[in-house]
Image (spheres, grey):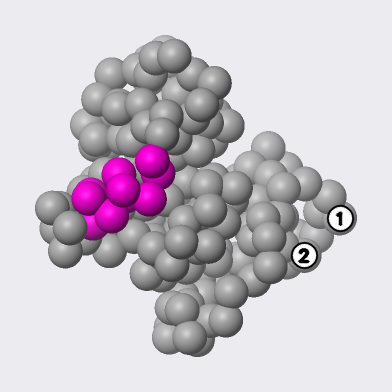
Amino acid sequence: MAKLVFGMNQSLDGYVNHTEFAPGPALFRHWIEHVRGLTGSVYGRRMYEIMRYWDEDDQEWDAERRAFAAAWRSQPKWVVSRSLTSVGPNATLVDRDLEAVVRGLKARLAGEIAVSGPDLAQSLTDLGLIDEYRLYLHPVVLGRGKPFFAGPRPPLRLVATDPMGEDTIRLTYVPA
């Protein structure tokens, strides 16, 4: 049975606006390895549209960015959207019955499936489907943006704290 994990970079005040801060080199390497190890990812529409950046090569990318793009392209993706009519390579559009689709993925796959996007994560939290939450806390305060928890925070239990890279700590929680 697969494990569903929601994890994102986050400011100290709880926002996940990726355009305001970026992971340092060590944390970016962590994300490369993390994506390589995934069974797949379930994306909300907005996060999928942001991540489509990695579908096209950029001549200015360094070796690590090319490695991340290769890892991202190779993993299966399920994109939850009622407005999209198609998705890119190695992706499947989920436009109805989110609960049945995700329960089916968890039942038939092994390993870790990432959840990408706070609104999608809130929907899956409400359905009781997220097995683990990973908050990658960066020492910045934004004061605005998209919050990590798009709705009421579920009851959680801290199970691990790990330094990640130069200035980030990962807090790992499971439902309480």
- The foreground one among 3 and 143 is 3
Residue 72's quadrant in the figure?
top left
| Quarter that holds the N terminus | bottom left
* C-alpha separation, residue under disc 1 versus residue under disc 2: 7 Å
Q: Give the residue type that dot 1 points to.
A: Gly
Q: Position of residue 51 (x, y in %)?
A: 47, 30
Is 3 situated above or below 108? below
Residue with the mark numbered 2:
13
Q: Residue at x 64, y 71 (%)?
A: 153
What is the magenta segment's predominant secondary structure? Answer: helix
Q: Position of residue 15 (x, y in %)?
A: 71, 55
Residue 106's quadrant in the figure?
bottom left
Q: Residue furthest right?
A: 143
- Label 2, secondary structure: give it: loop
Q: Is residue 162 visible?
A: no
Residue 143's disc number: 1
Is 114 situated above or below 139? above
Is 117 situated above or below 174? above
Q: Residue at x 46, y 79 (%)?
A: 175
| Mark 1 vs 2: CB contact within 8 A | yes
Residue count near mark 2 (Cα–Cα under 10 Å), binned few <14, some 14–19, many ≥20: some
In this picture, residue 130 sits left or right of residue 14: left
- Label 1, secondary structure: give it: loop
- The foreground one among 6 and 96 is 96
- The foreground one among 88 and 94 is 94
Q: Give the residue type that dot 2 points to.
A: Asp
Q: What span is in magenta?
A: 97-106
Q: Is residue 44 visible?
A: yes
Q: Residue at x 45, y 23 (%)?
A: 52
Residue 121's disc number: none
Q: Position of residue 164 (x, y in %)?
A: 47, 67
